[in-house]
């Protein structure tokens, strides 16, 4: 019997190598793990985040029985190119990435900024998205989206974090309660679990350009979310300072048949503060026949 030289697919976030693929004029960095069966789940992340900001506990739990693909959009982390100036252009880049992988259908999960992009993909390419998960995010033209990212919260909390010698997400994502502080420390410790092949940190200029793009989304005309045909799960904390929690309720009211989960005593990072519950909710959502 001939010896197989096929390498097993990585099953954990800590061991998934950084891969590269050419999409148009850019080379995008991504990680691909879990069994190569069924519809893959594509992950789109938040403002300022590279691949290293995904919670390994969340990714590993889902990768036990499904393929997970996470990418850096142009201008982020190790990907080449420039941050697109509009969410619609980010969505086209994500669609181009999926096509370059040879995929014709995906499940799509977007967190925060990634949720803006995921909505746009679901509107622009409905046949591409089987099921949709929107976490800590809001719709185009949503009240307050252009306020915290305009500087009031982001830069203040970045300054607080610098003084405290910690990650700004400790302040931006989690409430300053005993439970919130404990969840923040546990989450940040999990982000440090990966030691091999770390992603390239986002540059300050790219971060500022992302903020400009988010401002444009917050000031844009509302979109007809009733056109989203993919079954949709919406999740957030009950006190999101970055993308107001009320906008999760707004999307729920406008996306037909959507499911809404609001985690108590949680903020923008509520899905990571309540990571085990969120994993169960996502798995149930993706595995439910419709």
Image (spheres, grey):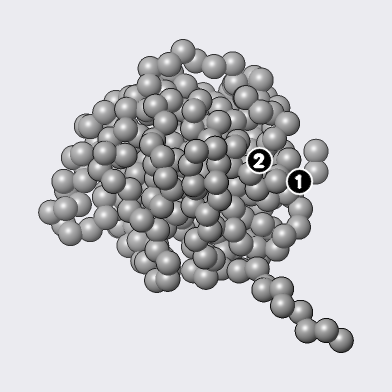
Q: Position of residue 141 (x, y in %)?
A: 43, 18
The residue sitting at 61% across, 55% down in the picture is 68
Left or right side of 283 for 31:
left
Q: Quadrant of residue 126?
A: top right
Q: Residues within 10 Å of mark 1 (few under 14, many from 20)?
A: few
- Which is nearer the N-term, disc 2 or disc 1? 2
Which of the labelled discs sits on residue 288, or is there none?
1
Residue 263 seen in this snapshot = no
Left or right side of 223 for 245:
left
Which residue occupies the foreground of this view, 202 or 244?
202
Q: Label 2 belongs to which residue?
A: 99
Could you tell me which quadrant the N terminus lies in? Answer: bottom right
Could you tell me which quadrant the C terminus lies in? Answer: top right
User: Residue 77, relative to residue 260: is it above or below?
Assistant: below
Q: Residue furthest top?
A: 221
Real-space Cα distance between discs 2 and 1? Answer: 25 Å
Q: Residue furthest right?
A: 1
Q: Position of residue 232 (x, y in %)?
A: 64, 35
Q: Quadrant of residue 132?
A: top right
The residue sitting at 48% across, 42% down in the picture is 26
Q: Position of residue 195 (x, y in %)?
A: 39, 71
Classify mark 2: helix, strand or loop.
helix
Q: Residue furthest bottom?
A: 1
């Amino acid at each position: 019997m001939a010896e197989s030289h096929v390498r097993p697919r990585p099953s954990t976030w800590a061991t998934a190598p950084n891969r590269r693929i050419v999409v148009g004029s850019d080379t995008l960095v991504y990680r691909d793990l879990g069994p190569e069966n069924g519809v893959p789940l594509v992950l789109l992340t938040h403002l300022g985040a590279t691949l290293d900001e995904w919670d390994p506990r969340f990714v590993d739990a889902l990768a036990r029985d499904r393929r997970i693909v996470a990418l850096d959009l142009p201008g982020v982390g190790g990907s080449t190119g420039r941050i697109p100036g509009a969410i619609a252009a980010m969505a086209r880049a994500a669609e181009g990435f999926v096509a370059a992988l040879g995929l014709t259908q995906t499940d799509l999960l977007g967190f925060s900024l990634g949720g803006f992009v995921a909505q746009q993909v679901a509107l622009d390419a409905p046949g591409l998205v089987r099921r949709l998960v929107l976490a800590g995010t809001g719709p185009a033209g949503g009240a307050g989206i252009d306020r915290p990212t305009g500087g009031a919260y982001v830069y203040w909390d970045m300054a607080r974090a610098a003084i405290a010698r910690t990650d700004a997400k400790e302040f931006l994502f989690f409430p300053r309660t005993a439970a919130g502080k404990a969840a923040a420390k546990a989450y940040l410790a999990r982000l440090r679990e990966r030691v091999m092949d770390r992603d390239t940190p986002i540059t300050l200029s790219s971060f500022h350009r992302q903020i400009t793009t988010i401002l444009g989304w917050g000031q844009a005309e509302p979109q007809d979310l009733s056109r989203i045909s993919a079954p949709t799960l919406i999740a957030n904390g009950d006190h999101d300072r970055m993308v107001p929690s009320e906008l999760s309720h707004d999307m729920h009211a406008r996306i037909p048949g959507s499911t809404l989960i609001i985690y108590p005593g949680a903020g923008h990072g509520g899905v990571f503060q309540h990571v085990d519950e969120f994993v169960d909710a996502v798995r149930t959502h993706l595995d439910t026949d419709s």
